[in-house]
Amino acid sequence: MKQWNQGLIGKVFYELDPTDKNKFRTVRVAWNGFANKMVLQYSNAGAYIIGTPPDGMPAMNPRLRSSIVTMQNNGNNSFY
């Protein structure tokens, strides 16, 4: 699956708080086998922490985020 998704599965990004640029949270792209799609996993239950993102960690592109969140099943699931 990692090869099919250009290495996105398991990759960690950071996302800045839109109201306070001194806060951020991490977002991990994961594979949900039961839903048969990629999902986003947020650190600390989605809460932002005060600080700066670690060096070398890429920022989450808003278009990538929206495409993963809105990706729908194709109906050909093996579990259903």
Image (cartoon, rainbow, N blue to C red):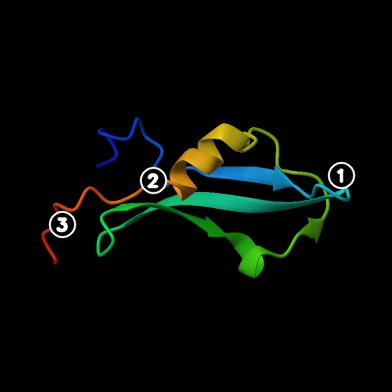
Q: Which mark is residue 71?
A: 2
Q: Is residue 55 left or right of residue 73?
A: right
- From the image, tell me which residue sits under label 1: 21
When the figure is inspected, residue 54 is found, relative to residue 3, above or below; the finding is: below
> Residue 77 location in percent, x, y?
15, 57
Label 2–label 1 contact, CB within 8 A:
no
- Find numbered disc 2 in the image and state the secondary structure of the residue it sits on: loop
Q: Identify the amino acid type marked 2.
A: Met
- Find numbered disc 3 in the image and state the secondary structure of the residue it sits on: loop
Q: Which mark is residue 77?
A: 3
| Mark closer to the chain start, 2 or 3 | 2
Q: Is residue 37 left or right of residue 27?
A: left
When the figure is inspected, residue 8 is found, relative to residue 26, above or below; the finding is: above
- Find numbered disc 1 in the image and state the secondary structure of the residue it sits on: loop
> Residue 9 location in percent, x, y?
38, 44
In the displayed image of the protein, which residue is found farthest to the left?
78
Residue 34, picture quadrant: bottom left
